[in-house]
Image (cartoon, helix red, strand yellow):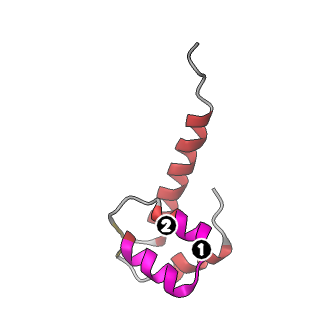
Amino acid sequence: MLLSPTLDRFLASMEYPALRDDLLREAAREGLCTEDRALLESLPEQSYSAAWHIRYRLGRAALAEAFESRKPVAA
């Protein structure tokens, strides 16, 4: 999953540790687009220690979603 350049810069500039609510509040304050804020909102509610931790969670969720959509449907 590729993050938008704006979201990537935002994550790099955040102070950590940060809760999901902290990320959402700052994203709104910074004027991030709806799609970027939706990605942050999809994160589990927990404390994130660094930008890589968020990138990892978003990538893992995207990978799980991709595999889920490829599951064969039982007849």
Name the residue at 45% across, 75% down. 24
Dividing the picture into quadrants, the one containing residue 19 is bottom left
- Say which of 7 and 13 sits in front: 7
Q: As displayed, is residue 46 above or below residue 18? A: above
Q: Position of residue 72 (x, y in %)?
A: 60, 23
Tally the marks: 2
Name the residue at 46% across, 64% down. 41
Q: Amino acid at mark 1?
A: Leu
Q: Quadrant of the C terminus?
A: top right
Name the residue at 54% across, 86% down. 30
Observer-side mark, 1 or 2, equals 2
The residues bearing labels 1 and 2 have C-alpha atoms spaced at a distance of 9 Å
Q: Which residue matches tag 2? A: 40
The magenta segment: 21-38
Which residue ends up furthest to the top in the rendered image?
75
Q: Position of residue 27 (x, y in %)?
A: 51, 79
Contact check, label 1 and label 2, Cβ < 8 Å: yes
Dividing the picture into quadrants, the one containing residue 8 is bottom right
Q: Which residue matches tag 1? A: 7
- Say which of 53 and 3 sits in front: 3
Q: As displayed, is residue 75 above or below residue 33? A: above
